[in-house]
Image (cartoon, rainbow, N blue to C red):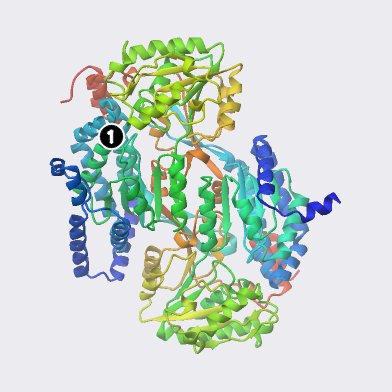
Amino acid sequence: MGSVEKETKVFDSEAASSMVKELRGEFLSGKTRSYEWRVTQLKNILKMSEDREQDIVKALHSDLTKPELESSIYEISMLKNACTLAIKKLKQWMKPEKVKTSLTSFPSSAEIVSEPLGVVLVISPWNYPFLLSIDPVVGAIAAGNAVVLKPSEVAPATSSLLAKLVGEYLDNTLIRVVEGAVAETSALLEQKWDKICYTGNGRVGRIVMAAAAKHLTPVLLELGGKCPAVVDSIINLKVAARRIVAGKWGCNSGQTCVAVDYILTTKDVALKLVDALKHELEGFYGKNQLESKDLSRIVNLNHFDRLTKLLDEDKVSGKIVHGGERDKANLKIAPTILLDVPQDSLIMNEEIFGPLLPIFTVEKVESSFDVINSGTKPLAAYLFTDNKKLKEQFVMAVSAGGLVINDTVIHLAVDTLPFGGVQESGMGAYHGKFSFDAFSHKKGVLYRSFAGDAPVRYPPYTKGKLAFMKALMSGSILGVICALIGLSKN
Amino acid sequence: MNISMELLRDFSSVGAGASRAFSYPFTRKTKQRRLSFVYLIRTSYSFKSCSATLSLTAEVEEKPKFDVDKAALLARELRKSFNSGRTTNYEWRMSQLKSIEKMLEEKENDITEALYKDLSKPGLEAFVAEISQVKSSCKLALKELSHWMIPEKVKTSLTTYPSSAEIVSEPLGVVLVISTWNFPFLLSLDPVIGAISAGNAVVLKPSEIAPATSLLLSNLVEEYLDKSAIRVVEGSVDETTALLEQKWDKILYTGSARVGRIVMAAAAKHLTPVILELGGKCPAVVDSNINLQVAVRRIIYGKWACNNGQACIGVDYIITTKDFAPKLIDALRYELEQFFGKDPMESKDISRIVSSSQFARLARLMDDDLVSDKIVLGGQRDVNQLKIAPTILLDVPEDAQIMQEEIFGPLMPILTVEKVEDSFKIIQSKPKPLAAYLFTNDEQLKKNFVQNIPSGGMLINDTILHVATDGLPFGGVGESGMGSYHGKFSFDAFSHKKAVLYRGFDADASIRYPPYTTQKQRLLKAVINGDIVSIILALIGW
């Protein structure tokens, strides 16, 4: 009886509040501060990813018909990498960083101590529902925090698997999963957290940050944006086309925050590029691409309808040069390329997040920078070129979360690079050591002894003291000596 | 050194090229400048010296209100300036920083005077805690900027082989700095230095509660800095609200947690990241095995000699053992007399309370029934001069108001505990402070304190000085704020760290691409895990 009641009980504010209180109590016990606890949990995550790889692949297939290779590479392997790195480096990351001190506080020593923030909340999305759930959790644990994870209800199989796996493999006194949708998320957001990491869209990002403001909770927002790929004429077209296909359709059918959203190229390159893309698409996914097993489906009907609306807009429907087929029953849309869509079309004004790729042509490749900068800052921007000058200009002039020259998406696999957006594409960053830092407070600590106490600091303030302090602060040794022997520099 | 200079030249010339590529013809640029000049005159809402002769009503009529429209216009204008690329330029940043340095040299007396007017801040405090701090920030930025701006090379992994990667610091855009009245000069310009170093356009809103400094800042910024990218908006709630409605690329606010929440909620609407420098009750734990005289002097320095306790990192209260408290109080009494004389109300070496509302708040804390009989030293006040003497209260109850809110004034409660370690629980039971201090010679106690007491920053055996250490980040945690600045952290606080990965077209491995086969999968996994043996096994088809 009791357990049935428990199951049907909704997760409301009250439930959220008592859970946070419990976790905070456990956090204050100091358990998460120890290196051993952190490493044990990280090792368990690694074990879980190895033991349960098939379950994870299955859940991802059920939620998105995600191809096994995409699941095991982009989700599971990436996560295992993050975990392995954290396990390997944790001791080093936890060590206080010694810093130099100045003459003003002589004699002294100083260090920056990384301390856990407390109890943190991770809200993850449905497109990489495994990776984007556990990857931030790895950072939170490495930094010694208690964590609550709220996976997306739009990927229900993965959400329930995560709840099960975390229950089975991790320390549930400090690490929890709360499943649910808007009501549960709202209940969670009412609580006081020490950090919130949200991955999703800008609209909800604003809601999360506004809720966080009530408790002065810092936020890490991983949002999206229209990630452009600029294609210059002097390139290896075949390789570029493959990498664009991989960074669009090979990435969850374009349902990826760093996927190529649209292409910018010159008129003369555009046609050649379309041919190359068509050729590679056929090589990758066969003649009937709607049927390919190597492509994810659209996550749900809402998104399917949103995407078909983008395709069916009057201004756009005549611009399809490849694909366009759809299968509503199976939520599939074939890889679709659109050439010369107008800038004021819907498809050029919202994040596409699906298998549609508009190609926008410009007179000179440099003008593409203006097109990019006229929109909001994307999470990633890509450039294909062999022109060194153009590369330099791109890196200087185009603002985005991250940039890749001559490839797509794989900057996320470089753990020495921070992953995070700017402006509309988000704030804060993680990955590698940045994950540890994102969930740590950097406490500046200065150590002094009782020796060497100079009365010049203290009242009553005399002219001599002022002269001495001025000399000391400006690092003028001569001035210090003058002041000490009572000479005025003036 | 040479390499970095080379890189730098490369960097800035690319910058010039890029801004040219954006095709802002020269004519348009001059027109833009003329426009902004007209705008400045029309909306000159700052009190000019001549307006002092006008009656108040005339002044209200004369002074165009800085409303949402004006704020929007200002933000748009600065954004245009920023988009032109001028602030990104190394030379521009250096020239502005140099102008600030020049301004500090030339206007030191004006600044000291304004601070005296606002807070009767003693000259030495004005110099040591404000002017010289801004100076050293500026100096450091001037010295290090070329290094800070160089992209940071990072290692890449086998997964992306062959490739190279770097982290490029790029300006965020147009940023807003809202400063406060207690160190109205330092806490205005120090963040502005960071914002300029990182190549941003900046609007500074100084506090209306320190009106002389606010006006001076407005005049000085106009006189010394590039108006097309750096502005001061004077005002209070209305003006701040108008500013907060605009879209900024970062907001740095120094002040109270209450307003901090408002600032962050306003920022959320535009997804603007914030740095909040708030306060909190900063404790000083005093152990018994110490050099009492030095400890006491440093506590006084960190309380009364620090703007009379009106400092976000000032010592808020002391925790010590029951046995040691009487000795500590005697020593405090003795040193206070050495510093401020027999009658501290007459001392010129101590700031006054900033305003009558702050005075009333502090008086209320002292008059609380729970604490009024706990005063063991001081307690005198003069409402006309807004002075309160250094006041020590012993054994105040934890539920008294004085132990619930940040004191921000010359009142010092001393809590006593049986064992010095018991102090940890008291501190941990309160919101995280901006600073925590410990006086001890016990190495183990130091270690425990650093490990277990959460706080923005920490200083062992002294007060305040950690904020003058530019290798340390200055910032709070929890209720004491978020984000940090000072030294290179200031540059980082106003930069976006853009990840850049470079690849060539050669060595394109087809295993990345569909159709996906089992062998591809095995090989890819091995590559991603960096497992050489597995790579070889997969390659030979095992």
Of residues B161 and B328, the one drawn nearer to the viewer in this rendering: B328
Residue B133: % across, % down: 32, 35
Q: Quadrant of residue B391?
A: top left
Q: Which corner quadrant holds the C terminus of chain B?
A: bottom right
Of residues B525 and A166, the one drawn nearer to the viewer in this rendering: A166
Identify whether A234 is placed above or below B417.
below
Of residues A127 and A430, the one drawn nearer to the viewer in this rendering: A127
Identify whether A332 is placed above or below B325.
below
Residue at the outermost right position: A1
B482 sits to left or right of A296? left
Residue B505: % across, % down: 51, 73
Residue at the outermost front position: B57
Residue A49: % across, % down: 73, 57
Of residues A24 and A227, the one drawn nearer to the viewer in this rendering: A24
Identify whether B171 is placed above or below A269.
above
Residue B128: % across, % down: 30, 29
Q: Which residue does the image show at 58% across and 31% down from the upper left?
A: B428
Residue A101 visible, this angle: yes
Instruction: Give the amino acid type for the residue marked by disc 1 in the picture.
Output: Ile
Q: Chain of mark 1?
A: B
